[in-house]
């Protein structure tokens, strides 16, 4: 396992507008990155057999709306940071699930976003962007059954970790005014399903 971050924050009425009203619900985001698929498989086997709260977790998660990417491939990543822990930092995770006809467009838009982020964001200082990952995978037919078959939909997950909340706020301001594909991206995203966690503090992070 190369990275493990957990964050939680309020759900917003509009997934692409972080200042929109809260729904009263809470969103949790769990991001884990492994060196290989074998590492992820070992994790599932170890959790199901050795974690005493595994069954309770499955029951709890089963009562929620779950968006999951399993065995997803990282298609864009910035930066190769040396930070061992992101605890206390600010995380945003967006999951976009779209029809296969819109996958190619999504890949182009997310590649454009990654290129823009690389030249527009600081790597150090109070507003620094510490981590940027985009992953892609077919949506599973059952979010909590790791052996379930994939659907015809594809999910993209975009996760960004900032040094402070102000860095994320500045990102949103820049995004709407400076990224040339912003309006195209919003139109594309709204044609599918969106799950979001905006600007939440990371409560658990490995390795510390």
Image (cartoon, helix red, strand yellow):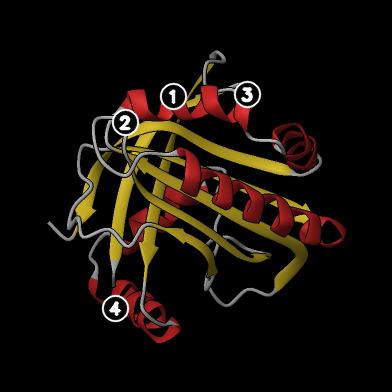
Image disc number at residue 177: 3
Q: Which mark is first along the chain, 4 or 1?
A: 4
Q: Are marks 2 and 4 in contact (CB under 8 Å)?
A: no
- Distance (Cα) linking label 1 and label 4: 40 Å
Q: Which residue is mark 1?
A: 170
Q: Which mark is first along the chain, 4 or 2?
A: 4
Q: Which residue is mark 2?
A: 127
Q: Please provide percent x and percent y for residue 81.
A: 27, 58
Q: Which mark is first along the chain, 1 or 3?
A: 1
- Distance (Cα) linking label 3 and label 1: 11 Å
Q: Are marks 1 and 4 in contact (CB under 8 Å)?
A: no
Q: Are marks 1 and 2 in contact (CB under 8 Å)?
A: yes
Would you identify the image quadrant in which residue 88 lies? top left
Q: Secondary structure at mark 2?
A: loop
Instruction: Classify mark 2: residues with Cα within 10 Å, few (<14), some (14-19) or many (20+).
Output: some
Q: Which residue is mark 4?
A: 46
Q: Residue at x 36, y 39 (%)?
A: 122
The quadrant the C terminus occupies is bottom left
From where the camera sits, is residue 16 visible?
no
From where the camera sits, is residue 20 visible?
yes
Q: Is residue 100 above or below residue 8?
A: below
Q: Secondary structure at mark 3?
A: helix
Q: Is residue 25 above or below residue 144?
A: above
Which numbered mark, 1 or 4, is in the foreground of this view? 1
């Amino acid at each position: 396992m190369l990275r493990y971050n957990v964050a939680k924050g309020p759900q917003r009425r509009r997934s692409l507008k972080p200042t929109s009203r809260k729904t009263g619900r809470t969103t949790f985001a769990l991001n884990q990155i492994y060196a290989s698929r074998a590492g992820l498989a070992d994790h599932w086997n170890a959790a199901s057999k050795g974690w005493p709260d595994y069954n309770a977790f499955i029951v709890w998660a089963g009562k929620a709306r779950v968006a999951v990417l399993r065995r997803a491939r990282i298609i864009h990543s910035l930066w190769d940071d040396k930070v061992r822990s992101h605890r206390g930092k600010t995380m945003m995770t967006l999951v976009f699930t779209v029809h296969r006809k819109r996958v190619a467009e999504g890949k182009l838009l997310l590649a454009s976003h990654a290129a823009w982020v690389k030249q527009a964001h600081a790597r150090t200082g109070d507003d620094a962007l510490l981590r940027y990952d985009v992953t892609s995978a077919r949506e599973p037919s059952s979010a909590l059954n790791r052996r379930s078959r994939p659907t015809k939909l594809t999910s993209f997950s975009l996760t960004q970790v900032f040094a402070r909340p102000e860095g994320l706020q500045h990102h949103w301001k820049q995004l709407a005014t400076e990224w040339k594909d912003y309006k195209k991206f919003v139109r594309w995203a709204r044609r599918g399903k969106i799950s979001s966690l905006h600007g939440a503090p990371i409560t658990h992070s490995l390795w510390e």
